[in-house]
Image (cartoon, helix red, strand yellow):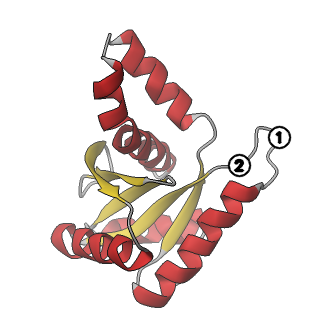
Amino acid sequence: MAVITLNELKELKSTKCRLLGLDLGEKTIGLGLSDTTWFISSPLDVIRRTTLENDFKALQKAKDDFLIAAFVIGLPLNMNGSEGPQVKKARAFVDDLLKVIDIPVYFWDERLSTVAVTRTLLEADMSRKRRSQVVDKMAATFILQGVLDCCR
């Protein structure tokens, strides 16, 4: 498939399949999962990154297990909206991903998603160790929820 627009993504809603949100990090990929009505996003898992091949196998498994219509991938734009090195890495990851997994991909501006999630976890008085275990999948959930809200 290919990178798609928001309107193209909205057309997939009628399939009753889910969306999978991805927060790409250097060491992990956080996963958030929508319900079939595209109303709410929930934390799913964290993939510990080893090789691209293993990353893609884990994503393919999630795609198959949860009947995923599209991947929503956080695009880490700079605060001024420009694209820096992290955006280039995300786009390269997607280029490689699309050679292996046949699925539409939608990019979502993820500026401050990790900051917002970390602040929420701090307000919940979560320990540093526990925060580090959940922040990536919570960031993916936050990214995905933004898309779901736009699709209403």
Side of 87 where 140 appears, left or right: left
Instruction: Give residue 76's position: percent from left, percent from top.
Output: 64, 49
- Quarter occupied by residue 107: bottom right
- Quarter occupied by residue 112: top right
Question: In percent of the image, x 32 and y 70: which residue is there?
Answer: 59
Instruction: Give residue 27's position: percent from left, percent from top.
Output: 44, 53
Under mark 2, the amino acid is Leu
The residue carrying mark 1 is 80
- Report how far apart the C-alphas of labels 1 and 2 lie in the structure: 8 Å
Under mark 1, the amino acid is Asn
Question: In percent of the image, x 40 and y 42: which residue is there?
Answer: 136
Side of 151 where 84 appears, left or right: right
The residue carrying mark 2 is 77
Tag 1–tag 2 contact (CB < 8 Å): no
Q: Is residue 4 visible?
A: no
Q: Is residue 88 visible?
A: yes
Badge 1 element = loop
Is 137 or 35 nearer to us in this picture? 137
Instruction: Give residue 8's position: percent from left, percent from top.
Output: 53, 72
